[in-house]
Image (cartoon, helix red, strand yellow):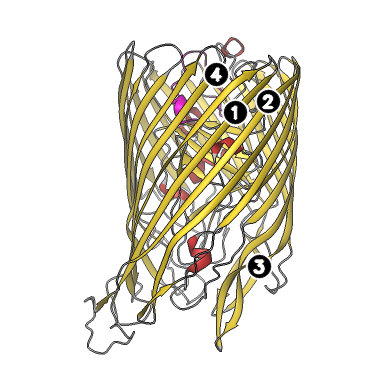
Amino acid sequence: MKIRSTRSVLLAGIAAFLPAGIAVAGESDVYDLGQIHVTADKERWSIFDRFGGTVVTDEQTQLHAKETLDRAVDLAPGVVSNNSGGTRNEQLIFVHGFDRFQVPLSIDGVRVYLPADNRLDFGRFLTGDIAEIQIAKGYASVLDGPGAMGGAINLVTRKPTRSYEGEMRVGTEFGNDGTYDGVKTYLRAGTKQEAYWAQISGTFNRMAGWELPQSYNPTAYENGGRRDHSDTRDWNVNAKVGFTPNATDEYSIAYTKQEGEKNAPYNTLVSTNRYWSWPEWNVQNLAFNSTTAIGDKSYVKTRLFYTTFDNTLDSWGDAAQTRHTNAGYVFTSYYRDWSAGGSVEAGTELFGRDTLKGALHYRRDNHTEWNANYTNASGTSAGCTVNVVCFTEPKQTTLEDTWSLALENTYRLTPSVDLVQGISYDWRKLWQSEDFTSGAYVHYPLRDKTAFNWQMAAIWRYAEDAKIYANVSDRTRFPTLFERFSSRFGGAVSNPGLEPERAINYKLGWTKAYAPKSQVSVEAYYASVQDMIQSVPIVYSGSSVTQYQNVGDGWYAGVDLAVDHALRSDLIVGGNLSLIERKVTAPYIPGFQATDVPELKGLVYASWNPIPTVTLTPNVEFASARWTSRTVGTTTTYLRSGGYGLANVSAEYRIHSNLTLAAGARNIFDQYYMPSDGFPARGRSFFASLKATF
């Protein structure tokens, strides 16, 4: 898929419907202060940013009806989403094979980090208010903060571009037999004046669930039709104001609140399900962003934030989720977390050839948790009543600071060749770590860690519309609190001394635009991973449990290819292809395989205007089988699952310049496939939406 261009003269007249995400000429609605260092080259036209990152635009996500982040990133080469399976059944994203722990997520440059375990469910993040999704693959600038071992994802919201403007979208979804599944709405209003701007927007999704393919064979744990416990509800609101005293400086305050509740469908193949639901999955963020020019050659950017995360997990005693029984694994778990911090970045031009930048990042994470148990303090049912809390744990708190100091220099070797060098030093200070297990408080040993990172890149723009780039990036990722300390309800033991894992990413890429609306890009990469963190089965005090350990090393290698070609002025065809191979050595885990990522993944599309007001966009998404895992008791086995080829279509009819009707279908042939063992994917579905602007 294509990437947003910055040279409007080359893009004049290109329609915004392009599935590659190219924008038409005109002022951008991207909230610039929310961007990270994954942007197109602002000096020359380019298809990718100078380090090979990808940008998925609002035009793309609307055209293909990608209302959630996990769906939207599938439009980018080298990026794949998958269901996690298991009890949590969350939506995951992998960038060049790296997972959610190794590829941090930000919203407007502010890291979305869950202090306990960072187990983000990417299906909770809605794209209605997102102007662009920035994806750094392998090489993520050290200026953007710690932990980007395999890349980074940043969701950049929108801001107004006219004196008064607004937008409304309303959409519905239907199952393979016409069953009404839910409604999705988006509202936005804003103003841009000479010295300030302001905007408020909101998204609301309420889904009753989704339908399995009609060829699905019912089991004892799922009878088919609408997938049991697939209902969700999500809404968010985003309000921000900006002050622009001159052409170079900007100061803004942004407030975002997102609330969600969800269920998690059960495994359809095994009887080891735990019956979990999330009545709360809420994130709230307040941020200040600024950029100030100092003379003609220097600048300072600042960012301050305060984020809260409230999460409630209900573990039920029956599949219908009606009874909290007295079994040991039935409980209500509460997380009440907050993070606060900020960053400052400064840069200046030196000697006419060098641009030197530095950044300091700080984040404090506070995690507080407790369980309301339906057993007594000793873990038995004596004296307890079904559906009545019998014992509430005392609160347990963990407090940790993370710092990062980074420097990056760009040297202009020639007018067409840039050399970039970056280094950073990260450190983590653990102040407090508590747990409550077996009826007593546990105070874990306090261990601090440090890490040094470095990266280099070379970019050769051998023509105004073409370039070759090469880079290498050596980055680390500190383990989460969950990986170091969680007892997993008695099934695991802690490892306070768990070391960071590290990856060295190498990339070589080429991009070229050979005509308006036509371009090609290819990228090859190799990543060497050391001290990989995995959950290992061990025997501890005579019991079979697990422990997170630095189990071994591995490597990831692959190729990304993207092509878009204008056959005629009214017909564009193209697509992308991603190949990846992953090998991991984990001697303590029998038969271990790297799971969830197919070796082959791609998209082929056409975009046709039979008449000026109508756009038809059929596409085919495909992927090979992938490794998945099945755990019964303490035994995990690995098997192949999940190859597919899905036909989809969308259509847009521009009724008026400010009114558009869209409709389409996904998985047209209602194909049955199962990317994760025991978790079949959605069958055929239909959607329709109406968009109005003023």
Instruction: Quadrant for residue 251, please give it.
Output: top left
Q: Can you tell which mark lies on residue 383?
A: none
Q: Which comes sooner in the sequence, label 1 or label 3?
A: 1
Q: Residue at x 22, y 88 (%)?
A: 383
Of 421 and 57, the residue lying toward us: 421
Q: Can you tell which mark lies on residue 357?
A: 1
Instruction: Quadrant for residue 563, please give it.
Output: top right
| Amino acid carrying mark 3 in the image | Leu
Element under label 3? strand
Of 542 and 123, the residue lying toward us: 542
Asked if the residue under mark 2 is in contact with the one under mark 1, i.e. CB atoms within 8 Å, the reply is yes
CA separation, marks 1 and 3? 47 Å
Q: Dot 2 corresponds to which residue?
A: 410
| Amino acid carrying mark 2 in the image | Thr
CA separation, marks 2 and 4? 14 Å
Q: Which residue is drawn at 35% across and 14% down?
A: 162
Provide the residue span drawn in magenta.
Answer: 18-35
Image coordinates of residue 479 in percent, x first then y, are 55, 59
